[in-house]
Each structure stands twice: as structure tokens, then as C-alpha cells.
Amino acid sequence: MNPGRAAAACEVKRLSIIIPTLDEAECIVATLESLGDLRRRGHEIIVADGGSSDGTAALARDLADQVVCSPAGRAEQMNAGARAAAGDVLLFLHADSRLPAEADRLVLQGLAAGGLVWGRFDVQIAGSQPLLRLVASMMNLRSRLTRICTGDQGIFVRREAFAAIGGYPRQELMEDIAISARLRRVSRRCACASAA
């Protein structure tokens, strides 16, 4: 059976939001606090720390369900977080990014409606300068045209599909582009409203 179709047939109920960190003390508390409502609605927050020396892991402990340690490198860290996750959908979020308040509804409905196994959010860059809106629009357009996503867009994927493709490839850079290429061979992707 096609792993994409098998995963799409499963009902999705819970997200595991996985945040790779390395020396993110300046932003990790604000990011985790912004996810508080999602956590209260039963979704799981996992910080995958790559050996921070600035106290990031300690700051995250009370605001996340788990803090897992991993060798440094986003791909390694996100795979470690995925191994620890209990959710039906894995959502990978950069430590300096924010999700919409209704991210869970957007993801779960988007995947269910299209029978899809993965997706991403549109980027919205914080700030009032018109140039920032233009940059965000160009990033979103590029993603639509190429069907490639970046980590800033909050990539999400059903657990079964993530396992079927072997997770993030072990590489130092552009792991988000590499996993997008793998996932687009499994199914089309779902695009949700903005992450900032």
C-alpha cells in the first residue's frame, strides 16, 4: 500500500510540536508561551536541544512537555524529537517562529479535507515595513511554485508518512528542502494560513 494513502486514512487528533534549539535563551520562553493554548488543548510540545550552553533547556522545562537532548544539527534534533513524540502529526517549528492561534484546527482540517499527509504554513514576517510583506509574499509564492518548504514555514507531517520516508535526512544544511522533496513524492501538500 502507498504510505501516503495509508497515513491519510488515519484520523488525526493530536499534534506534537517539535522545536529544535541551540542557544535560544533569548526567544525560547516567548515561543513556548505562545504555544500555551495549544498545549492546554492537549497538543504536545517537545524541545529538542542540541547542547545549548546558555540555559535554553532549563528555561524550556516548565513550558514544554519534554526536553530531549540530541547531538547538534537541526535534522538530528528534529528526528530525536520525532522519536519522543506521541502525536498523530509532527509539526516542526523554528525557535524564533510563531504559529497562528488556531494552528491545530488549520492543520487537522487541512490534512483531513484533502486526504494529505503533509504541509506547511504561509510565512508572515513580523514588522510594519512594506518590504517585509513583499519578502513574505515572495517566499510563499516560491513555495507554491516549487512545492518546497523551509523550516520557517512550520512543516507538518503525519507520523506514519514521516516514518515511511525515514525522517529528516542526516545533513548539515537544507534539511527542510530535502524532506520537502521526499514528501512531495508521497502526496501533495497542504498550505495553511500564516505563521510569523
Image (cartoon, grey):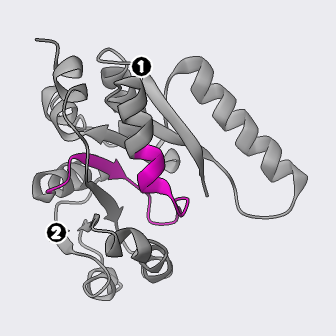
Who is closer to the viewer here, 96 or 115?
115
Badge 2 marks a residue whose secondary structure is strand
- The image quarter containing residue 129 is bottom right
Residue 86 left/right relative to 14: left
Who is closer to the viewer here, 143 or 87?
87
Who is closer to the viewer here, 93 or 86?
86
Q: At label 2, which amino acid type do we have?
A: Val
Where 151 sits versus 168, above or below?
Answer: below
Furthest residue toward top: 1
Q: Is residue 24 visible?
A: no
Which residue lies under the disc numbered 2? 68
Residue 30 left/right relative to 139: left
Residue at 32% in and 43% down: 172
Find the distance from the CA under tag 2 to the CA under tag 1.
31 Å
Query: Tag 1: Cα neighbours inside 10 Å, few (<14), some, or many (≥20)?
Result: some
**Magenta-highlighted residues:** 86-107
- The image quarter containing residue 158 is top left
State the image coordinates of residue 95 (x, y, percent, origin top left): 44, 65
Q: Is residue 85 visible?
A: yes
Where 66 sits versus 196, above or below?
Answer: below
Residue at 61% in and 18% down: 145
Furthest residue toward right: 130
Which residue lies under the disc numbered 1? 188
Which mark is drawn over residue 127?
A: none
